Image (cartoon, grey):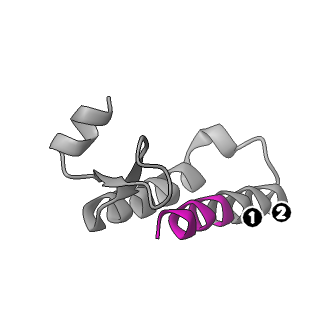
Amino acid sequence: MIDKLESLRLIERRPHPTDRRAKQLVLTPEGVELRERLLKVLAEEPLFAGLTQNEQDALEGLLKRALSRNEALQA
């Protein structure tokens, strides 16, 4: 799966800054764009129809925070 995402240029592998054994997976600009589009679609899908608007907003905020934290760790 990682190889497929990499071949689609959605992610790239980078060396870990402190652990030479590990690689980090980082979203490319194309990957970031796709993630944003997916977040918008997910917010509109029936999957979330059972949630109140406040619950949807809270979930979106949590997902964005988690993704931002992941990006900060990758930098």
| Residue 34 quadrant | bottom left
Residue occupying the far left of the picture:
7
* Mark linked to residue 57: 1
Tell me which amino acid carries mark 2.
Asn
Q: Main secondary structure of the magenta part?
A: helix
Callout 1 environment at 10 Å: few (<14), some (14 to 19), or many (20+)?
Answer: few
Magenta span of residues: 65-75
Tell me the residue at 58%/68% (across/down).
68
Which secondary structure, mark 1? helix
Tell me whether circle 1 and circle 2 mark residues in contact (CB < 8 Å). Answer: yes
Q: On the image, numbered disc 2 is attached to which residue? A: 54
Callout 2 environment at 10 Å: few (<14), some (14 to 19), or many (20+)?
Answer: few
- The percent position of residue 48, horizontal first and vertical second, equals 68, 44
Q: Quadrant of the N terminus?
A: top left
- The percent position of residue 30, horizontal first and vertical second, equals 26, 62
Tell me the residue at 71%/66% (across/down).
61
- The percent position of residue 12, horizontal first and vertical second, equals 28, 53
The residue nearer to you, when weighing 14 against 65, is 14
Tell me which amino acid carries mark 1.
Asp
